[in-house]
Amino acid sequence: MAIRIHWSDDLSVGIPRIDKQHHEFINILNDLQDAIEKKKGKDDIEEVICFLEDYAVLHFSAEERSMIRYGFDGFKDHLAQHNIFRNSLQNLRKKYEVSGPTDSLADTLETQLCGWFMNHIQNVDTLFTAHLRSIGALEDVVDEPSKEEKPKASDGKPQEVEIIR
């Protein structure tokens, strides 16, 4: 059985709405791990992968816009880290399409995506939070997204997700 990520204060970046997004990411990663381990049907796993892809686009693009808006010097390095995750997620999808829900796929999810995400929150996102604190912008960071920016559930309705701007 794979290791699950459990939310704790150690994962908090100190911005409640970003923490909420990260918590949702963790839930999605754990759902995908469960679906792969239980070798659920193709549609179930595909739905979780699609939602994770959509959520990554939503969260990362919002975070990146905020970094530009608030003049974060570490933007290029942070963007490179996001691209590593995007590439790992693409590789996971390809591996799934070729081999299905295998133990190897579950290992890839755990080591590449979950490991990256934990490290990213604790060591990379906190740099941006520190920057926001240093310029007094923590309170200005979060806005409610429009409906068209929200990822869609399988029923086509927008998910309740808040993004940063």
Image (cartoon, rainbow, N blue to C red):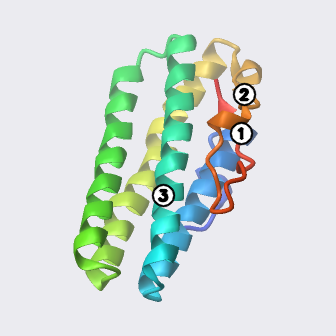
Question: Which residue occupies 26% across, 62% down?
Answer: 94
Q: State whether residue 44 is above or below residue 54.
A: below
The residue drawn where x is 69% and y is 23% is 141
* Amino acid type, residue under disc 3 in the picture: Cys
Q: CA distance from mark 2 to mark 1?
A: 8 Å
Residue designated by label 3 = 50
Q: Quadrant of the C terminus?
A: top right
Decide if residue 3 is in sight here: no
Disc 1 crowd rating (10 Å Cα; few below 14, some 14-19, many 20+) is: many
- Measured from the top left, where is residue 35 in percent x and y? 49, 79
How far apart are the two marked residues, 3 and 1, measured between alpha carbons?
Answer: 18 Å
Which residue occupies 60% across, 68% down?
6
Decide which of tag 2 and tag 3 comes sooner along the chain. Answer: 3
Q: Secondary structure at mark 3?
A: helix
User: Of tags 3 and 1, which is closer to the observer?
Assistant: 3
Spatial CA span between label 2 and label 3: 25 Å
For residue 49, which numbered disc appears in the image?
none
Out of 79 and 152, give the one closest to the viewer: 152
Q: Are marks 2 and 1 in contact (CB under 8 Å)?
A: yes
Secondary element type, mark 2: strand
Q: Residue at label 2?
A: 142
Q: Closer to the observer: label 2 or label 3?
A: 3
Quarter-of-image position of residue 28: bottom right
Position of residue 64 in the picture relative to residue 157 (left or right): left
Is 30 on the left or on the right of 145, as rendered? left
- If you read the primary sequence from the N terminus, does the residue marked by circle 2 or circle 1 appear first? 2
Q: Residue at x 54, y 57 (%)?
A: 51
Type of amino acid at the residue the image marks with label 1: Glu
**Marking on residue 162:** 1
